[in-house]
Image (cartoon, rainbow, N blue to C red):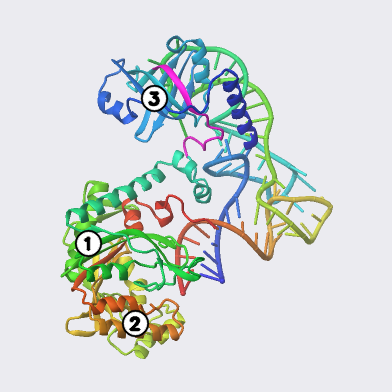
Amino acid sequence: MAEAELVASRREKLARLRARGICPYPYSYPRTHTTADVRAAHGALPPHGRTGTVVRLAGRITALRRMGKAAFADLRDRAGRLQLYASADGLGAEAFELFVDLDLGDIVGASGEVFTTKTGELSVDVREFTILAKSLRPLPEKWHGLRDVETRYRNRALDFISNEAARRAVEVRALVLRACRSYLDAQGFLEVETPILQPVYGGATARPFVTHHNELGRDLYLRVAPELYLKRLLVGGFEKVYEIGRNFRNEGISAMHNPEFTALEAYEAYGDYERAMELAEELVTACVGAVAGSLTITYQGRELDFSRPWRRAPLLELVAARSGVDVERPLPELVAEIERKGIPLPAPLRQGPKGKVIEHLLETCVQDSLWNPTFVLDFPLDTSPLAKRKRGREDLVERFELYIAGREVANAFSELNDPDDQRERFLRQEALRAAGDAEAQPLDEAFLRDLELGMPPAAGIGFGLDRLIMILADAPSIREVLAFPPLR
RNA sequence: GGGUCGUUAGCUCAGUCGGUAGAGCACCGGCCUUUUAAGCCGGGAGUCGCAGGUUCGAUUCCUGCACGACCCA
């Protein structure tokens, strides 16, 4: 039947309800239990059991099995599903007629005694029910739900109604956010909020979104990272701070990238990147525990083990071992060797800087093999303008990226607090920008001025929470963990 | 940006070696007082993604476009 006819049929029912003086959209329905409450209290009841307990439930009708003078319906609420039993005897002829005239998708309130059927199914023997919201559109197929990804994302509420996995991803996000906050709060971190609209963007290698403030008559950038503001709070004397919020990077959409994504950044004065590793292990295992209740989960059919301590491997060693390329050679020789080995290398990278070539090798040759949590240590100086030099190595910085299931989940450093060194790093970024690198970071004078006041040495870490949520929700794409993924 | 695959009823999917399409669910009518992917009987429902081309005839073949999935850059 054409969709319009299905809607028309439901609208006719709506009109009939109104004609009988029944409001199809009443104001409230105080319930006494959720479906899960009922299961918790009476789940062990044997077949043919009666409880004498009357409950009031509210939720959406997701199945309706009419049997003449009796009917069964599935009612679903936020906590689960429970069967309703309605009979002409129990409800009276008039109410029973209304019950069997319900449509799948209608939201109802129902009350009655909790009992079990002869097959042992926990049910409510409905003696009173109320339509709380008439549904005017047909639901997807009851067994398969919505499958087409495009249709699912364009009809996300319908997707949540019909797909358990889609609902679960939203819950996992909430569990992860809560676990992060409760861990950091317990550690004495202060949750802060810093500007999203920024006059100068910084803190990450990325292209920004630009917007305009009419009153000030100037362009502002949506932040690509909160990093520089959080460090200014360190200067101000806040020794342990974190922020959870949206970052915006003007780049493509893929299974791993969304232009707006949720980041967690945390800074702790007087620590270095060793401390950041400790924080990362504790924070992520807290999240895993909150979601899975165990440190071993399955991601995309493969076991993932979060047991500590996590593997720590220097970037240069990993790249050398996996690519077979000697990364200590000068750039031209390095490029030549990469091309000789047939490893794809985008043309612009041939000009360097060398750090970008090495990070490219990490992405193409190493990353996929980093399944269980792995800290990749000590990144090139020239791709890390906000990190402190590695003790004993002029060309490297104390920085790590955390990889889980082949994905970069976090990035951290011993934070650079030498204002003169920081200015030089910015100037090198400006030089790259002048040479055409649109992702190079702009020099931020306000930040430098605050650094000159003295910022304590600090550990800093940033997480891409969407990716962690993906892993914990067993989602193959970042879009699955966004309540409303972007559409073209 | 390139490659591969896909787009058919509200949903999940078949199918047409070129002759205007089917099933299940959902919907409508009938029977049915313990079903649970209820069952049985009957019925209605489609711009076969869009636009061109070839052809007597295109949903099917060809080209382009849109949107999507996966892979590569």
Circle on res. A280: 1
Labels 2 and 3: the sequence-earlier one:
3
Circle 3 sits in a helix, a strand or a loop, which is it? strand
Give how far across and how far down residue A369 sits, in percent. Answer: 30, 66
Q: Identify which amino acid the numbered label 1 is placed on.
A: Ala
Labels 2 and 1: the sequence-earlier one:
1
The residue marked by circle 3 belongs to what chain?
A
From which residue to which does the magenta span run? A126-144
Q: Which residue is mark 3?
A: A83
Circle on res. A105: none
Give how far across and how far down residue A353 sits, in percent. Answer: 36, 84
In the rendered view, tell whether residue A201 sits above or below residue A67.
below
Give how far across and how far down residue A368 sits, in percent. Answer: 33, 66
Q: Identify which amino acid the numbered label 2 is placed on.
A: Phe
Packing grade of label 1 (10 A; few <14, some 14-19, many >=20) is many
* Snapshot quadrant of residue A400: bottom left
Q: Identify which amino acid the numbered label 3 is placed on.
A: Gln
Q: Which residue is mark 2?
A: A426
Circle 1 sits in a helix, a strand or a loop, which is it? helix
